Structures are given as C-alpha cells and as structure tokens.
Amino acid sequence: MPTRYILPKNFATKQLTAGDIVIEISGGSPSQSTGRCTAITQSLLDRYDSGMVCTNFCKAMKPKEGYSLFIYYYWQYLYDKGVFFSYENGTTGIKNLDFTGFIETKTILIPPVDKVRAFDDYCKSIFNQIFANSRQNEHLAMLRDTLLYKLMSGELDVSNIDL
C-alpha cells in the first residue's frame, strides 16, 4: 500500500473500516474498464501499522453490516462481465466511472438476509485464512533470507549436521 500523508481531520473522515469496499473510479484502459474493487477486511487492516484511507481515483462504499462480501463478489462478477465499460465517461483521456449512474440504473438482486449473512461469514473465514497464510509466508521468507545470508557468509556452520 502506498503511504499518504493527510491532515488528521481528513484521516478521521476517510479512514477505512472492516466491511468497506474500495472502488476504482478513474483510470482503466481501452481493454480494462474502471470499477475494479477490493474488500477491506479486519485481516487486511491488521496487516498494517497505521490506518488505511481511500484517496485519489477511488471511492469507498460502506455497505450495511453483513452485506460487504456479497456486494464485493457481486461487483467483481459485474466487472468480470465488462458491465462497467458502459458506465464510463471522461473527456481528458482518463476514463471515469459514472458510479451514481450505475447505482441509479443497475438492478441488483439481493438474496434473503440469512443467506447473505451466511455467505459473508463463510467468506470472512476464507479471507482470514488467506491473510494468515500470507503473513506466515512473509515470515518464512524473512527467515529464509536471514539464514541463507548467514550460511553463505560462513557465519553459520552446518558441517556437523547429519542428514
């Protein structure tokens, strides 16, 4: 994640919380539409020492509690189908997502609340495992790099180890 320096008052209003979804509203290319998204989970927030904010070229959605990951995956499904190409505008060479136009015109079918919440809970457990594995991989890579340096420099002698 890039580091941004913002005023404390702006940080308070822009700080992301678990359950938020960040949407790319500017950018894209001729073959890639705007509208890419990411889910902000507690596991993601815990991975960094400082809070996260949504700034330039992005918009944060704050879904009703329990609906976050359903909306995230539904949004991703629409993105993969190329739906957001038809909601782009812009005359400066940078494409912009007409977020309001999309929200006002696109029908989104929402399953019963118990199904959505069960889906959300299941997805959270998967996300938590992914982030736990990622943290473990980073730790193992750091150990590998440290040990490899010590082995290559001769600082660590393993000649007496019987394999």
Image (cartoon, helix red, strand yellow):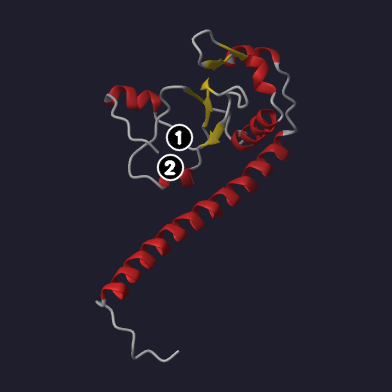
Place of residue 65 in the rendered image (x, y in percent of width and height, measured from the top left)? 57, 33
Q: Are marks 1 and 2 in contact (CB under 8 Å)?
A: yes
- Amino acid at pointer 1: Thr
* Residue 50 image label: none
Residue 61 seen anywhere in this rendered image of the structure:
no
Please identify, in this view, whether the residue under mark 1 or under mark 2 is nearer the observer.
2
18 or 152: nearer the viewer: 152
Q: CA–CA distance between discs 1 and 2? A: 8 Å
- Amino acid at pointer 2: Leu
Place of residue 114 in the rendered image (x, y in percent of width and height, measured from the top left)? 71, 39
Q: Residue at x 69, y 13 (%)?
A: 105
Secondary structure beneath disc 2? helix
Place of residue 47 in the rendered image (x, y in percent of width and height, measured from the top left)? 41, 47
Residue lying at the far left in this picture: please name it: 155
Q: Which residue is mark 1?
A: 17
Secondary structure beneath disc 1? loop
Q: Which residue is mark 2?
A: 45
137 or 106: nearer the viewer: 137
Q: How busy is the neighbourhood of tag 1: few (under 14 within 10 Å), some, or many (20 plus)?
A: some
